[in-house]
Image (cartoon, rainbow, N blue to C red):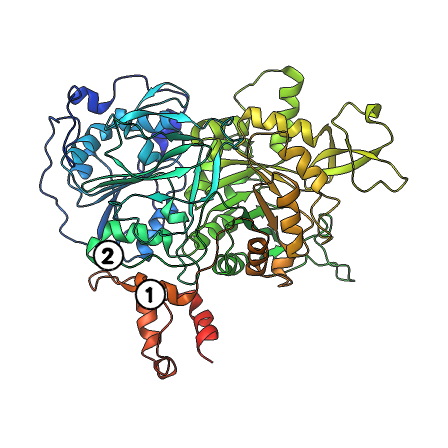
Amino acid sequence: MEAATVAAPFSSFVTSTQNSSSSSSSPCSLLLSRKKKNLGSVNLRFKSRLSVRASSSTSDSVVTLLDYGAGNVRSIRNALRHLGFSIKDVQTPGDILNADRLIFPGVGAFAPAMDVLNKTGMGEALCTYIENDRPFLGICLGLQLLFDSSEENGPVKGLGVIPGTVGRFDSSAGGIRVPHIGWNALQVGNDSDILDDVGNRHVYFVHSYRAIPSNENKDWVSSTCHYGESFISSIRRGNVHAVQFHPEKSGGMMFYSKVGLSVLRRFLDPKSSSKQKPEEGKKASKLAKRVIACLDVRTNDKGDLVVTKGDQYDVREQSNENEVRNLGKPVDLARQYYKDGADEISFLNITGFRDFPLGDLPMIQVLRYTSENVFVPLTVGGGIRDFTDATGRYYSSLEVAAEYFRSGADKISIGSDAVYAAEEFIKSGAKTGKSSLEQISRVYGNQAVVVSIDPRRVYVNDPDDVPYKVIRVTNPGPNGEEYAWYQCTVSGGREGRPIGAYELAKAVEELGAGEILLNCIDCDGQGKGFDTDLVKLISDSVGIPVIASSGAGTPEHFSEVFETTNASAALAAGIFHRKEVPIQSVKEHLLEKSIEVRIKIQPREHLSLLHTSDEHPSSDLLVYKSYCSSSQTRQHRCCPPAPSTHSLQFLIDQHGN
């Protein structure tokens, strides 16, 4: 039985090789020269000197996982357990060769991953395993590493299994933003197999680099996705599969989306697959606008970790007690928002890591518990910076971020530390490579790093009054001022800094940020709408995705910010916590406005997901069977689909009356 928390087998190795780059020959090219003729449907491009021994594992419920020690692999672990499978971690190349089925959830940057594979012998073992047409599923970077090479911090040689070079998205193609973050549509081929349940639904991507279909690799391609251009979103040849998107983050709740977990289930247990007609309904056609639920988490005066919400960053009640506003428990609210259809969950630890970054265990536990049943992306921020403790031991921001990733975070959000780094960069004109933003981006990729900007509007009479970017505002200031600049703050808005939001956004993009979370102190908690002047300024100025935050009070505020700015996502907190506006109402309104969103699937559309084999009943199915055997449910002609345990009450509420 696997321990509750498993240290990545190669995590220390990854940290030690973070600054190196792989320029040596690929493992597969060392094994043989490429064949010139077109190969058969299951023949690969190399011959190995290694042999695959008989598997030492005879259990059909065991999955071998290659975790090379970077990024959030906890989510795939939780998804596999959720589907009823146990996990065997790869410790040696022999574990790869002996695997009955192998999943490689690559997360992070190309070069550090290849360093690990080359220096541990895992790369050659992978090539041998794939050559023998053994069941393999690569995820995200696990797909990219199969190609000849990558341009990421390179060129860097890959495994050389599939012809082609992995290159960066061309941001000039259709004005796209890089990284490609969010829920997009697939164009699925006829021989896709594990993608049969995707149908018209969105799946979740987060990457800056992609592989392009070509005549040389066309026999591998099982689906493509369009983002400025057509890129490879999945490959399949024989028993070898890989996907660019994240199935473990593409939904798993029966009441919302079966897409993500069904991809994993079809790979792990092909016997459970049924040729079910994809669901009818609104067809996913392009990258969807995201609706994000944000949870500001802090310790209240009793020492409990609670979700709170401030008015212009003041989180205390206006009462005699002046206590911290308590809007619920973090894990419970995150699970509820997942069921309600949030596209992402963002945790902002607003008082964390004051004294010791790695000692904030309650927040780490929140991430771990949340990721067990929430299969959409999780972002966490608060205190991610370099730190020296009282004993003199130095902890890099990379170590702090790594702990977050290992605990279930998909992205980390940096606030004050990014402001200081940007100020230094603007002053010196040079990158040091030492800031938390630069370090984490280099190892995990910029798609894993969000910079949170907390600006305050400052009105001026004339654009030349200040040395910062000034705009004409829609609503004049208190004294009729027509112009304003946005001063950035640190320490939760308590300290203003000599840098504007525009200047900060441009600087952090250059330093390696992959996304900007754009707050506005003036609008926070007011419920009067986003500051569209600010959002338009920043989203028009950078080439990375921008999340609009602060001020949402109605569904119309979401459509307004999407229609008048280039925001990729919109975030809200208080209106969701207080149940003033349901997430589903926001999405229904956006659909009415012809804005692409990930939509909710009605319960009866999920019945095909119950085709789980008797040998591998998922936890959802067990709960479902128990519930459907009750006298209350037998009176219904059609049982709803299986819920996870924590959503059983929701099922009863929907169908029991």
Give x and y (percent) for residue 460. Answer: 84, 32
Instruction: Give me the disc on residue 273.
Output: 2
At x 73%, y 40%, the residue is 494
Residue 81 versus residue 558: which sits nearer the camera?
Answer: 558
Residue drawn at x 47%, y 43% is 286
Badge 2: few (under 14), some or many (20 or more) residues near its Cα, within 10 Å? many
Is residue 552 something one can see in this rendering? yes
Q: Is residue 637 left or right of residue 374?
A: left
- The vertical placement of 59 against 423, above or below, is below
Q: How many marks?
A: 2
Q: Estimate the x, y position of residue 298 in percent, counting from the top left.
A: 61, 51
Which is nearer the eye, 638 or 4?
A: 638
Q: Quadrant of residue 405?
A: top left
Residue lying at 39% horizontally and 62% vertically, measured from the top left? 254
C-alpha separation, residue under disc 2 versus residue under disc 1: 12 Å
> Is residue 623 left or right of 574 when viewed as pictured?
left
Q: Is residue 385 above or below residue 376?
A: above
Relative to 283, 456 lies left or right: right
What amino acid type is highlighted by mark number 1?
Leu
Q: Taking 142 as reference, is 179 left or right?
A: right
Q: Quadrant of residue 509?
A: top right
* Mark 2 secondary-structure assignment: loop
Q: Position of residue 19 (x, y in %)?
A: 41, 21
Task: Tell me the residue that label 1 is attached to.
Answer: 607
Q: Which SS class for mark 1? A: helix
Sequence-wise first label, 2 or 1:
2
